[in-house]
Image (cartoon, helix red, strand yellow):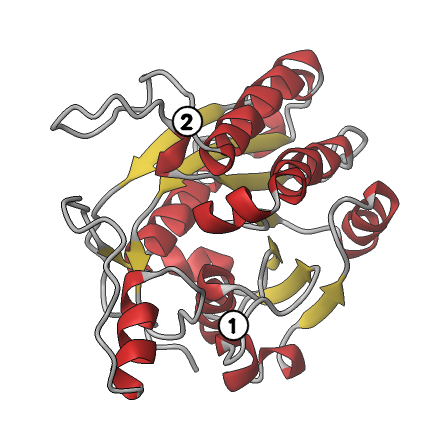
């Protein structure tokens, strides 16, 4: 199975203390990867990251990607084989409360990561994780394709679309010349699963309300959403990275690749799925 190729590889995960980041860290540890994590904090209490005691099992760095010098130093020191970039301000509601933080985190943090790679000479595969909210929501009844227009009527969506535009311009201006690096962009949303304690999420909201004997406040009762379990997008991220690494020839012999991938539902083997 493609997961085996991550064994004994150095994998850097930004946003590793969050919901998806903790699951991805646990999964990679289980299959034998050497995991390095970078996050600015532990975003929830309770926390899956703390429950799994992941800090004891990985190399843990705690700082904000707004610091270019720090992320550049970590990449230079650790020399990762893979980077999964999940770090972001990931809540629509918080983007209304603090739009500047959302824009800074989602655009400048990603730009600093990309800037850190301009002089990186080791073979590297990167998966930049954005969101299905990157698409301009025109309220049609079918799903969105990778080639559909980006946009956003709220700050969170706009920041994710802006992140992708900045990324593409950075790629075209600088990284296209580096044949040792391959980057894929993966968009996914409406993710559920154990260990998600963020606010304004449907299952955590239900559990919090029911534990107090209260009714659940459904914020958008008329909305229809394609929920997916956390292992589905994570398997997509890992599959995308593995496809890049397993192409014919070495990375240094192949042209730079840029791929966009929207993830709504994927099948994945039960091998190595349970965290720890």
Describe residue 242's horizontal placement relative to residue 124 as left or right. left
Quarter of the image with the N terminus is bottom left
Q: Dot 1 corresponds to which residue? A: 29
Q: How far apart are marks 1 and 2 (CA)?
A: 38 Å
In the displayed structure, would residue 266 be above or below residue 212?
above
What secondary structure is marked by label 2? loop
Q: Dot 2 corresponds to which residue? A: 153
In the displayed structure, would residue 137 be above or below residue 232?
above
Pinpoint residue 175: horizontal percent, then vertical percent: 67, 22
Describe residue 45's horizontal placement relative to residue 217 as left or right. right
Please tell me which of labels 1 and 2 falls first in the chain. Answer: 1
Instruction: Determine the residue positioned at 35% across, 43% down.
Output: 188
Describe residue 77's horizontal placement relative to residue 2 as left or right. right
In the displayed structure, would residue 51 be above or below residue 236?
below
Pinpoint residue 29: horizontal percent, then vertical percent: 52, 72
Q: In which quarter of the image is residue 68?
A: top right
Instruction: Determine the residue positioned at 52% across, 43% down.
Output: 96
């Amino acid at each position: 199975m493609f997961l085996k190729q991550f064994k004994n590889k150095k994998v850097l995960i930004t946003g590793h203390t969050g919901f998806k980041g903790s699951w991805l860290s646990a999964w990679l540890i289980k299959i034998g990867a050497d995991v390095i994590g970078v996050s600015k904090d532990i975003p929830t209490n309770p926390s899956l990251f703390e429950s799994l005691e992941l800090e004891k099992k990985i190399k843990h760095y705690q700082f904000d990607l707004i610091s270019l010098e720090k992320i550049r130093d970590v990449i230079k020191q650790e020399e990762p084989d893979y980077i999964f970039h999940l770090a972001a301000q990931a809540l629509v509601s918080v983007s209304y409360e603090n739009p500047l933080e959302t824009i800074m985190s989602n655009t400048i943090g990603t730009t600093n990561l990309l800037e850190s790679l301009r002089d990186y000479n080791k073979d590297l595969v990167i998966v930049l994780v954005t969101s299905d909210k990157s698409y301009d929501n025109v309220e049609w009844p079918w799903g969105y394709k990778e080639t559909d227009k980006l946009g956003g009527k709220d700050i969170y969506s706009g920041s994710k679309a802006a992140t992708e535009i900045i990324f593409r311009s950075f790629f075209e201006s600088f990284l296209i010349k580096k044949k040792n690096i391959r980057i894929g962009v993966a968009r996914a949303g409406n993710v559920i699963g154990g260990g998600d304690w963020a606010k304004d999420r449907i299952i955590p909201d239900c559990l919090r309300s029911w534990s107090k004997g209260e009714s659940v406040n459904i914020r958008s009762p008329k909305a229809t959403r394609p929920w997916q379990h956390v292992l589905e997008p994570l398997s997509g991220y890992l599959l995308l990275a593995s496809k890049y690494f397993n192409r014919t020839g070495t990375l240094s012999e192949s042209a730079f690749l840029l791929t966009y991938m929207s993830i709504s539902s994927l099948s994945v083997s039960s091998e190595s799925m349970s965290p720890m």
